[in-house]
Amino acid sequence: MTRKALGRGLSALIPGAPASAAPAANASVISSSTNGITRVPVEKIRPNHLQPRRHFEPEALTELATSIKQHGLAQPIVVSFDVATRSYELIAGERRWRATQLAGLKEIDVVVREPRDEKHRMALTLIENLQRADLNPIEVALGYLRLMKEFGINQTALAEEVGKSKATISNTLRLLELSEEIQKALQYGQVTEGHGRALLTITDANLRHAVFQKLVANKLSVRETEALAREMEAGPIAPETPSKGKKAEAKPADLRALEESLQQVLGTKVVIRAKKDASKGSIQISYFSFEDFDRILKVLKK
């Protein structure tokens, strides 16, 4: 797939022609076909190795299975037919397929598409899934990144292809700069994309982790997290102004290491100010609420 093809929009990436029925050679695995929707045995479908979704919530799957059992499948899944194995590979709808299995149903409604090659299959899978609203922010970010790498396009071109603003694409991709622990929290819904963006405003990794721990422990809103991030990033007290004609000296590496160590232990911003005689100085510990103050006291008393 070339950039030229992508430049013609999604109609070039994913042709808008009506979904094709599976070829006649696979008639033995098809139960029926109506209006482009085909019913096939659930056991004849296999997961897509390009699927951007990585986590399926068991409770949500159970609820969907109950709904499918009572009311049927509201929307068919999208698959491609593999002539060699005489089976189907999912393009979109793995969650619905899994729930159908959980409901104990033997057949499922599908729409069959015929990817031209592996790249086209990946494009179909990613675009189909990225246009759905139930992917978590990290899955979306990884999907965007993969499209950019595979098709050699930049954020501006990607924004045009998926119908999003460049700012939205950029903000979503930046979530991949967060630590693995925070990314997992985003994947499992412990924090939202708004929380993730607020954390990205903190440049220091240790402080960012400290704020993350606070927001999870105290169930902070996005606005509360943004305010806390601003305070932590700015620091509680402006640095001392050096005397006229004197340059501020850089803090020694050992003091910076001690600050980082204390920040990890206390989960808050710590500033060490040493006097000329390095054996004397002061430690400044920041707190941002009475609850935070009590928590720090408990850590210090241990």
Image (cartoon, grey):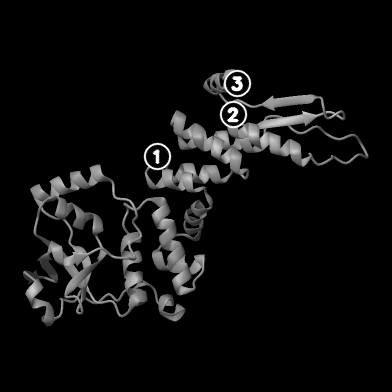
Quadrant of the rendered structure where residue 38 is? bottom left
Q: Quick one: label 2, few (<14), some, or many (20+) residues within 10 Å?
A: some
- Residue picked out by circle 1: 190
Q: Which residue type does callout 3 highlight?
A: Leu
Vertical comparison of 293 with 180: above or below: above
Q: Please tell me whether mark 1 sits on a helix, a strand or a loop.
A: loop
Q: In this view, does 210 lie to the left or right of 9?
A: right
**Residue at image location 54% in from the left, 22% down from the top:** 295
Give me the C-alpha separation between circle 2 and circle 3: 8 Å
Vertical comparison of 16 with 238: above or below: below
Q: Quick one: label 1, few (<14), some, or many (20+) residues within 10 Å?
A: some
Q: Which residue type does callout 1 highlight?
A: Gln
Q: Please tell me whether mark 2 sits on a helix, a strand or a loop.
A: helix
Vertical comparison of 298 with 36: above or below: above
Q: Do the residues labelled 2 and 3 touch (CB within 8 Å)?
A: yes
Q: Please tell me whether mark 3 sits on a helix, a strand or a loop.
A: helix
Q: Mark 2 or mark 3: which comes first in sequence?
A: 2
Q: Residue 281 carries which label?
A: none
Q: Quick one: label 3, few (<14), some, or many (20+) residues within 10 Å?
A: few
Vertical comparison of 51 with 299: above or below: below
- Residue picked out by circle 2: 266
Give me the C-alpha separation between circle 2 and circle 1: 22 Å
Q: Nearer the viewer, mark 2 or mark 1?
A: 2
Q: Mark 3 or mark 1: which comes first in sequence?
A: 1
Q: Could you say where residue 197 lies in the image, as x and y percent from the top left?
A: 51, 46
Residue 156, can we see it? yes
Residue 251 or residue 115, whichever sits in front: 251
Q: Could you say where residue 189 lies in the image, as x and y percent from the top left?
A: 37, 43
Total labels drawn: 3
- Residue picked out by circle 3: 300
Q: Do the residues labelled 2 and 1 touch (CB within 8 Å)?
A: no
Q: Nearer the viewer, mark 3 or mark 1?
A: 3
